[in-house]
Amino acid sequence: MTNSENSLSVDVLVIGWGKGGKTLAAALAGLGQKVAMIEQFDSMHGGTCINIGCVPTKTLVHDAQERREDDDAASYWARAVQRRDTLIGTLRDVNHHMLADLDTVTLVDGRARFVGERTVEVSGGEDRLTVTAPAVVVNTGAVPSRPDLPGIDSPRVHDSTSLQHADPFPRRLAVVGAGPIGLEFASMFAGFGAEVTVLNRRPRLLPAEDEDVAAEVQSVLEGDGIAVLHEADLRGVEDGAEEVLLRLEVAGRSRELAVDAVLLATGRRPATDDVGLEAAGIDVDERGAIVVDEHLRTSAHGVYALGDVHGGAQQTYLSLDDHRIVLSQLTGDGSRSTSDRVAVPTTTFLTPPLAAVGLTESEAREQGRDVLVATQKVAAIKAMPRPKTLGDPRGLVKIVVDAGTDEFLGARLFHVDAQEVINLIALAMRTGTTATQLRDGIWTHPSSTEALNETLGKLAPVE
């Protein structure tokens, strides 16, 4: 490592302290390489997942599930936010020391902007630092998208970050958007005692899922008191003294809705604004995502992109796998690539959670596959007592299997512990483990995994 008062030269420069970036930095430092980690905000040491994404929101989801009917919503919410903040503060400190305690890592706080090939200028107040490296990794993540509408800058209009500290607690909440973030927050705030309305632009929820799965999700949400308005578009926001008035168009008709707060869950876009990518010769697509190949190489020699900034599915575990690909490029044989990914599962943390992997029944049939399908309501699965012991036997299990090979094509699990059981099915898909093998497996009792014994025994041809 070399540096002067205003410059620093290292082996690898990482811009952004996300899951992939911090893991890559630690791995390279462990191999003796000199690494600079640049992060704009000290409150983001550890990345989005630790600080404002997966972990804090799932902490709040858990506390919402634990709330009793006689708990005052506002005071219970305040305690939950305090617990969230205490936990995240601890985890942020752990993540800070994960790199700060390594002799070959230099931490730089400030805003990084490319000023040339593999060269960035970092600004913090009046200070400037130029950092160069033969290998640069862009890991700046994504930021919430915000529609350009009248009144949208109202202080009562939140994104998924600011709503986690809503004060006072919004007893009436409108959620604009019915994707994973919108539905998770809707389910969470209903659990905390809010009156929640979801504005869904499409004719039904979860259009990429089979209709029976989407219908079951809507039934559970409505059972929790959540109102879902389909074909609903937000046209404007009017801020009042005590509430905010939303001007909507619902199924072609004008409508108004008064609430205490609004969540804009209208998607996230790659954080590439004002990073100076053009100065480094880094191409972006029409959405602003950095263009990469299957080895996460950008159009600029020696520059790689990790995580949400290169578009695609925004999952922490994909960012973690991204670091393995770049590590293979920098220290291995370079063979690892995004094409190695098979059967990547997802979970939307509703109550109960909705987990998915592989094809839906509709997708399998559209591909002309000869399939077997098994679908069961959780409440009707006799060999699955765990949801009942927890007092939440809602949801369903739906599994699609290749009729010829007995291998899994996909699954949708909407039940207690679904986020864990889906990993078993994803592993079976990667290894060629058959449906019969899981059907006849021996699982702990009582567990949600036991549903496989019974549900897989009901596989039948699609009529």
Image: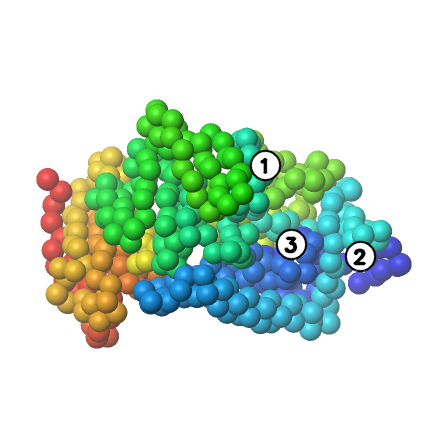
Q: Is residue 323 left or right of residue 120?
A: left
Foreground mark, 2 or 3, reads 3
| Cα–Cα gap, marks 2 and 3 | 17 Å
SS at mark 2? Answer: strand
Quadrant of the frame with the C terminus: top left
In the image, residue 9 lies at what x, y percent?
80, 57
Residues 350 and 315: in front is 350
| Cα–Cα gap, marks 3 and 1 | 17 Å
Q: Is residue 204 left or right of residue 104?
A: left
Q: Which residue is label 2 attached to?
A: 9
In the image, residue 347 lies at what x, y percent?
37, 55
Q: Residue at x 32, y 65 (%)?
A: 69
Q: Residue at x 50, y 35 (%)?
A: 237
- Bin the neighbour count of mark 3 within 10 Å (Cα to Cα): few under 14, some 14-19, many 20 and up: many
Residues 123 and 29: in front is 123
- The answer, for residue 169, to whether it is visible in the render is yes
Q: Which residue is label 1 attached to?
A: 288
The image shows a total of numbered marks equal to: 3
Give the residue type at disc 1: Gly
Single out the residue that lies furthest toward the front.
Answer: 241
- Is label 2 in contact with label 3 (beta carbons under 8 Å)? no
Give the residue type at disc 3: Gly
Task: First in sequence, mark 3 or 1: give its number.
Answer: 3
| Cα–Cα gap, marks 2 and 1 | 28 Å
SS at mark 3? Answer: loop
Per the rendering, the mark at residue 16 is: 3
In the image, residue 134 lies at what x, y percent?
73, 52
Up the image or down, 153 lies above or below 42; here it is: above
Quadrant of the frame with the N terminus: bottom right
Give the residue type at disc 2: Ser
Task: First in sequence, mark 2 or 3: give its number.
Answer: 2
